Image (cartoon, coloured by chain):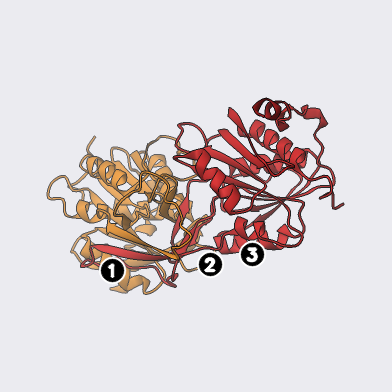
Chain colours: A red, B orange
Amino acid sequence: AIMEELFKSPEAAPADSLDARGLSITLTAGPTRELLDPVRYLSNHSSGKMGYALARAAADLGARVKLISGPVALETPPGVERIDVESAREMHEAALRLARQSDVFIGCAAVADYRAETVSEHKIKKTDDQEGLTLKLVKNPDIIAEIGAMQEKRPYLVGFAAETQNLESHARDKLQRKKLDMIVANDVSQQGLGFGSDHNAALLLWRDADGEAAQRHFPATTKAMLARSILAAILEGLPHSQGRTS
Amino acid sequence: AIMEELFKSPEAAPADSLDARGLSITLTAGPTRELLDPVRYLSNHSSGKMGYALARAAADLGARVKLISGPVALETPPGVERIDVESAREMHEAALRLARQSDVFIGCAAVADYRAETVSEHKIKKTDDQEGLTLKLVKNPDIIAEIGAMQEKRPYLVGFAAETQNLESHARDKLQRKKLDMIVANDVSQQGLGFGSDHNAALLLWRDADGEAAQRHFPATTKAMLARSILAAILEGLPHSQGRTS
C-alpha cells in the first residue's frame, strides 16, 4: 500500500499538466488580531507567506482566487481578489459567505482561537496597586469546522496544522474532527521553517477516493514550490463530479 | 504667562540653528511582543513611525543616535545604530544599559504593560469542552519610571503618552509620577493620526528651568515635522550644564 501511495502520489503529476481553469478557490491567510482595547491586541506569528504563495500559485494555474487576509505586510499576488479582515469574527463572516461559492476552500490563516470577553472602549490604564491582570477570553468561531459541517455546497476543504509536538497525530485528529478533505501539517518549532520564513516543510494527510487515509511528506523547500505541490495534490484529490463551476 | 510661553516656545527657534552635535540620544520605538506560547503573543498597534522619525531627525542634527526597536516594518534611518528587541524585558535591559551613556533618552515605544505569568513551551491546544480561557498577566518593568528614578547619570528624559481620553490630565500625571522632563501626549482616538499613520498631533508638556509646568500644542502635521519640533524643544530644554558628553 505504501508503494501504491508513492506511485499515485499527487506530486508525481508533471507540473505542466496542472490546470485549475474554471475552479473557484478561496483561501484565508495571515494572523487575526483580537482587540483588548483600542491599542492592545492578541495575535500570532503568522506572516501570511504560505497562504499568499498558495493564492499566487492558484492564480498562476488559472483559478479564480479570493484571498481573505488578516493584517500582513505582503503584496496582493497578481490576479487575486483580496478581502482584508482583522479579527477572527470578520474572517469567519467573509469565509462562510465565500465558501458556498467556492470549489476549494483552503484555510491557511492562523485564526485566533480566543478573543477577549469584553473589548474595552478606552485604553486600559495600568494601576500602581495592581500587580497582575486577569484577562478573560472566550472561544472564537471555528471557521474550518463550520465549513466542514456544511450540508450543501460544501467545497473541497483543506486545513493547516501548525504544531510544536506530535505533528502527525495532532494533524490526523484535526483532519477527522473537523471533517477536512486534506490537511497540511508543519512543525513550527523547526528553526528557519514555517512562521515568517520563506521556507517550509510539510506533512500532507488526505482521504483518498476510497475514504482511506493517505499521507506524503514534503521535505523543506520554498513556500512557492510547496504551494505548487499542495495545489497538485488538491487537483488530484478533487472529485471529478465536483467543481468546475464556470 | 501664556504669552511668555508662546514667545519663548521651543518651536520659535529657527530650524537652521538646531544643532545636536556631541549629544548622545537613545530612543525606544515600536511595540513589544509578549509571548503566550511559541506562536501567540500580546502586542499593540504601534507602527514605530514616530520613534523612527525622531531617530532620523536626531541623526540629521548630528547627534549620536541609538534606537532600541521592537518588531516593526521600517528601515533603519541613516546614521542610526539600531538594537532589535522583542519583549518588554529585552527592551528594559537594553534601555537601562544605554540610558547611563546618554544625554537624552526618549521613550517612544509602546511597551506592553503586562506579560503572561507563564509562557507555555508548546502551543496551547484549544479543547472542545472549554468555552473560555483565563490568562494571568503580570506587570512588566516600567522602563521610563526606572530611568526617571536614576540617581546618577540620569539623562534628560522624554516620555510619550498615547491616550483615548483626558489627554492633558493623563499626560500631566505621567510627567510628574514618572519624573519626566518632558512628555509628548497624543490622542490616538483621532482618525488618521497617531498609530500607523504618517501624521500626528501632539500636546507637549515640560518643566521649564524654574520647575514650572509649560505646554504647547502642535497641530496635526507629518511625523517628520513633529519630530523636528520635539527635538527643538528638547535642545531648548536641556540644562546647559548637562550633556555634550563628547
Q: Which mark is residue A125?
A: none
> Quick one: A164 or B11, which is closer to the camera?
A164
Badge 3 amino acid? Glu
What element does badge 3 sit on?
A: helix
Q: Which mark is residue A93?
A: 3
Whether residue A196 is visible, yes or no, is: no
Which residue is at a point 42% across and 54% down the rendered structure image? B43
Few, some or many residues within 10 Å of mark 3 (<14, 14–19, 20+) = few
> Quick one: A92 or B58, which is closer to the camera?
A92
Q: Residue B172 carries which label?
A: 1
Determine the residue located farthest toward the right in the rendered image.
A246
Q: Which mark's residue is nearer the viewer, 3 or 2?
A: 3
> Quick one: B140 or B153, which is closer to the camera?
B140
What element does badge 2 sit on?
A: loop
**Residue identifier under label 2:** B191
The numbered mark, 1 or 2, whose residue comes first in the sequence reads 1
Q: Position of residue B66 (x, y in %)?
A: 34, 39
Circles 3 and 2 in contact, beta carbons < 8 Å: no
Q: Distance between the residues labelled 3 and 1?
A: 43 Å
What element does badge 1 sit on?
A: helix
Indicate the chain on which mark 2 is placed: B
Q: Position of residue A75 (x, y in %)?
A: 64, 44
Few, some or many residues within 10 Å of mark 1 (<14, 14–19, 20+) = many
Pointers 1 and 2 within a single chain: yes
Q: Position of residue A90 (x, y in %)?
A: 60, 63
Which residue is at a point 20% across and 42% down the rendered structure image? B100
Q: Which mark's residue is nearer the viewer, 1 or 2?
A: 2
Q: Tell me where residue A96 sits by quadrant.
A: bottom right
